[in-house]
Amino acid sequence: MRIVIDTNILISGIFFRGKERDLLELWFSGKFDVICTEEIFEEYSEVLTRFTEKSGENKHQEIAGIIAKNCLFIKNVYNEKYSRDPDDDKFVNCAKSGGASYIVSGDKDLLVLKKIGDLEIITASNFLKSL
């Protein structure tokens, strides 16, 4: 199964405990594949840099390297508008381009979409329940 992980889920899973951390552990153990585009990875990296600098640890490159090794990078073939926040469209376009079943997010602008064709947009908690 392929999924797309929104940046807020990734950051929560790395820096905090909870369902988001559980999701990352399942990902790294090979339970599903996470697909990503260069644009999404750039956002991951930028936000990681901000969070690691705030924590006083400069491990953003190390963490970004681990994420890059575990992502399946794809190229977007869609450039559609879906979300009321245009910055979120890259996640939907990535999911559609890569044949993902889910986008896992905590972002209300994405969650309100619920379903686009066969693609479901759900929280980490609901995704874990669906496994």
Image: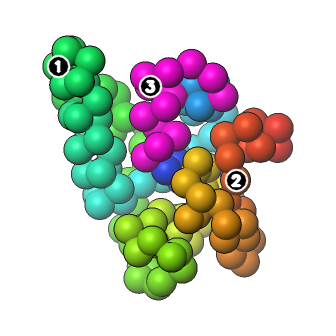
The first of marks 2 and 3 along the sequence is 3
Depth order, front residue of 25/18: 18
Query: Looking at the image, is 14 positioned above or below residue 108?
Result: above
Distance of mark 1 from mark 3, alpha carbons? 14 Å
Q: Secondary structure at mark 2?
A: strand
User: Measured from the top left, where is residue 36 in percent x and y?
Assistant: 42, 54
User: Measured from the top left, where is residue 25 in percent x and y?
Assistant: 58, 23
Depth order, front residue of 101/107: 107
- Per the image, is 61 magenta? no
Mark seen at residue 14: 3
Residue at 37 percent of width and 34 percent of height: 67
| Residue 119 seen in render | no
| Residue 49 seen in render | yes
Q: Secondary structure at mark 3?
A: helix
Q: Residue type at mark 1: give it.
A: Asn
The first of marks 1 and 3 along the sequence is 3
Distance of mark 2 from mark 3, alpha carbons? 19 Å
The residue indicated by pointer 1 is 58
Q: Do callouts 1 and 3 mark residues in contact (Cβ within 8 Å)?
A: no
The first of marks 1 and 2 along the sequence is 1
Q: Residue type at mark 2: give it.
A: Ile
Judge left or right: residue 61 versus residue 123: left
- Per the image, is 14 magenta? yes
Q: Do callouts 1 and 2 mark residues in contact (Cβ within 8 Å)?
A: no
Query: Which portion, as a residue range, is magenta?
Result: 7-19
Depth order, front residue of 25/45: 45
- Model colouring: rainbow
So how many labels did they put on this image? Answer: 3
What is the crowding at mark 3: few (fewer than 14 residues within 10 Å), some, or many (at least 20)? some
Mark seen at residue 122: 2
What is the crowding at mark 1: few (fewer than 14 residues within 10 Å), some, or many (at least 20)? some
